[in-house]
Image: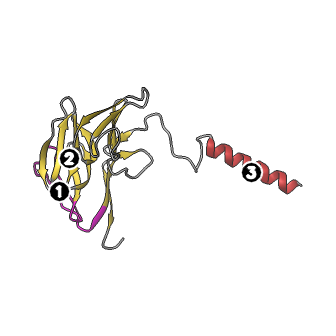
Amino acid sequence: MRKYKAAAAAAAILALLAFGGCSMFSQDTASNERLVNGTTTGNIQNLGFAVMEGSDIYVYYTGEDKFDRADIIKWNPESGDSSRVMADGGLFMSIFGGSLYFCKDDGIYRAPMDTFEQERVLECGARELQIQDGQMFYIEDGTVKSVSTDGENVDFAPIKNAANLVVSADYLYYIDSASG
């Protein structure tokens, strides 16, 4: 009976920790948790399907009912309001300097968030776009490359055999696809 009570008490403590937000089982939910540069606090990467600016979330729409596939939708989780702000958007979204940056098959694009008029910044086959301090990092053909947010060359040594790029806190993380 004593073992049963001890086991029940231990289970109750673990449940409180897990569901109480103070646990090794739950994500850190700091008050500043937000979507930034296609990444979410606590996750490695969401592939740029969503990014947040203020209290609005911009989402790459994958359905086909209310909006068209590939539309960029502005959604406010507090009010529940949603609207299409741009047709034919792209993935790996990031917000920098008042513009939404994203990747399409033929390059990296930006759209000022007051007009959402798209312009191609760089012709390339970029994926996994990340922006840090005015510098874009992306993977093309298995190589990490970098240019400024205007598409101009910067001092950066390309990294070959790379996959799954994330730039955070002045560090560049990737998987070496040659060695794992």
Quarter of the image holding residue 17?
top right
Quarter holding the C terminus? bottom left
- Rounded to the nearest angstrom, the CA distance separating label 1 from label 3 is 52 Å
Asked if the stretch drawn in magenta spans residue 149, the answer is: yes
Label 2, secondary structure: give it: strand
The image's mark for residue 10 is 3
Q: Amino acid at mark 1?
A: Phe
**Residue 134 in the image: x percent, y percent?**
20, 42
Asked if the stretch drawn in magenta spans residue 148, the answer is: yes
- Rounded to the nearest angstrom, the CA distance separating label 2 from label 1 is 10 Å
* Residue of label 2: 135
Position of residue 78 in the picture relative to residue 166 (left or right) = right
How many residues crowd around disc 2 within 10 Å: few (fewer than 14), some, or many (20 or more)? Answer: some
Residue at 14% from the left image edge and 56% from the top image edge = 124
Camera-side residue of 60 and 143: 60
How many residues crowd around disc 3 within 10 Å: few (fewer than 14), some, or many (20 or more)? Answer: few
Task: Determine contact: label 1, label 3, CB under 8 Å.
Answer: no
Task: Determine contact: label 2, label 1, CB under 8 Å.
Answer: yes
The image's mark for residue 108 is none
Quarter of the image holding residue 34?
top left
Magenta residue span: 140-163
Quarter holding the N terminus? bottom right
Pointer 2 or 1: first along the chain: 2
**Residue 94 in the image: x percent, y percent?**
27, 43
* Residue of label 1: 156
Residue at 19% from the left image edge and 62% from the top image edge = 158
- Rounded to the nearest angstrom, the CA distance separating label 3 from label 2 is 49 Å
Task: Determine contact: label 3, label 2, CB under 8 Å.
Answer: no
Label 3, secondary structure: give it: helix
